[in-house]
Every structure is written in C-alpha cells, then in structure tokens.
Amino acid sequence: FFSTLCHSLNIPFITEDVKSNIKKCGLRKPFAIEKLSILKNLTENHYVINIKIIF
C-alpha cells in the first residue's frame, strides 16, 4: 500500500546517488514529507482506523 501511494504521489521511495553508488531513502525530502502529511493527518485524527489489504 505505502509504496503504491508514494508512487502515485510521485515520491521516490528509494533514490540512488550515482556519484557515491549509495541508495538513500527518498521520504526524507521536504516535498515528500509535505505530500505525506495528509496521510499523517488522517491516521492521527482517527479518520482511518484500520486498512485491510485483500489479495
């Protein structure tokens, strides 16, 4: 669910630094935090209590 959400919001889940050949978390960038704040707001205010994923 979370990786799909990040992809739909155009947030890189993992980025790779080409110069140092190191993979980094893409969620720490300010624009990613701002985009994901809506999810934080929904869960902190108990608008979303339980998410069920059925395959």
Image: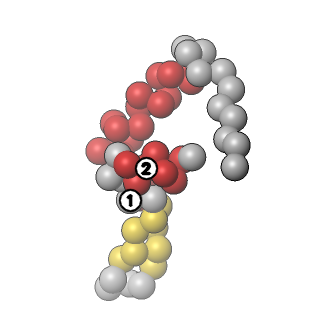
Residue 29 visible from this viewpoint: no
Q: Give the image location of residue 30, x and y in percent.
A: 32, 45
- As drawn, the label of residue 12 is 1
Relative vertical location of residue 41 with respect to residue 11 in this rendering, above or below: above
Mark 2 in CB contact with mark 1 (< 8 angstroms): yes
Mark 2 = which residue?
A: 6
**What is the quadrant of residue 24 in the picture?**
bottom left
Secondary structure of residue under mark 2: helix
Amino acid of disc 1: Pro
Residue at image coords 36%, 77%: 17
Amino acid of disc 2: Cys
Residue at image coords 65%, 32%: 51
Q: Earlier in the sequence, mark 2 or mark 1?
A: 2
Relative vertical location of residue 33 with respect to residue 19 in this rendering, above or below: above
Q: Give the image location of residue 28, x and y in percent.
A: 41, 51
Nearest to the observer: residue 12 or residue 50: 50
Secondary structure of residue under mark 1: loop
